[in-house]
Amino acid sequence: MGAADTGAEPPELMSPQVLDWQERRFLAGPRSRRHELRTVARVAAEFIGGFRRLHFVGPAVTVFGSARTAEGDPDYALARSMGAALSELGFAVITGGGPGIMEAANRGAKDVDGQSIGCTIQLPREQVSNPYLDVAIDFRYFFVRKVMLVKYSYAFVVMPGGFGTVDEWFEALTLIQTAKIHEFPVVVMGVDYWSSIVEQLETMVGYGMIARSDLDLLLVTDSVEEAVAHIDEVCRRRFHLRRPRPIRLIGEHRAPNR
């Protein structure tokens, strides 16, 4: 569906200032029914575009984390190793497509000839795609992007990050708690970094606000090997396979490209 169908200019032709203004108008309360209908059309078009681009990527794991993590940071190296390990297991690696942790995970996938996918978001500032993507899909709406990241992922890996990372992590936990998804492993990497939030989850269990079973598939670790083994075991049980069918043949492990 193009601009002629919605009465809207294609997002790629809009300035960041226009996008920012449109988003604030959309979230600021009711508008005319004509404007709301145009918004529905844009949302539908974005869903259709995402479905078309991601339908054939094969089994995937999404890695979340900060865009602010520099290449020399240990967390960058950990995310890169995680991306490579997931690829060697046969998964495509999906990230938000930006710099930092996202870049590291995509880069790790490319180190071992794995499939690397970025689901970027249009922002008035900041978002720049990293150079390690085989497929890059640009979204306007956060909620559409979040649906895609859950729909096409067999697991989430949560690296150190900020509001967006926590949002995605707790979105997954909410879907698990409400039985919208099941047998969905969530791996949290960064034991020290996330310790206070993990402690709060335990407090919530103690108060009866969440059930212990809601956290059954949550693994908190600093070990890539433990993380990958957990994801592999859950997927083997869920899909009755030794591991999901890879989208492409993954070659012999080799040292990361420098």
Image: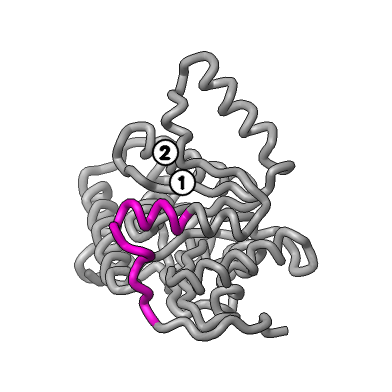
What residue is disc 1 on? 24
Q: Identify the residue at the far right of this view.
A: 72
Above or below, comparing residue 174 to residue 135 in the picture: above
Identify the residue shown where x is 64% and y is 59%. 67
Q: Is residue 18 visible?
A: no
What label sits on residue 51 in the rendered view? none
236 in magenta: yes
Residues packed near mark 1 inside 10 Å, few (<14), some (14 to 19) or many (20 plus): few
242 in magenta: yes
Residues packed near mark 2 inside 10 Å, few (<14), some (14 to 19) or many (20 plus): few
- What is the spatial separation of the Cα atoms under label 1 and label 2, in whole angstroms? 6 Å
Q: How is the image coloured?
A: one colour
What residue is disc 2 on? 28
Do residues under tags 1 and 2 come within 8 Å of each other at their CB atoms? yes
Quarter of the figure with the N terminus: bottom left
Q: Residue 15 placed where, x, y %?
A: 50, 67
Q: Is residue 93 visible?
A: yes
Mark 2: which amino acid? Ala
Q: Is residue 207 left or right of residue 223?
A: left
Mark 1: which amino acid? Arg
The residue closer to the viewer here, 255 or 30, is 255
Q: Residue 197 placed where, x, y %?
A: 63, 33
> Which element carries disc 1, helix, strand or loop?
helix
Identify the residue shown where x is 36% and y is 57%. 236
The residue closer to the viewer here, 53 or 193, is 193
Quarter of the figure with the C terminus: bottom right
Residue interval drawn in magenta: 231-248
Identify the residue shown where x is 58% and y is 64%. 127
> Which element carries disc 2, helix, strand or loop?
loop
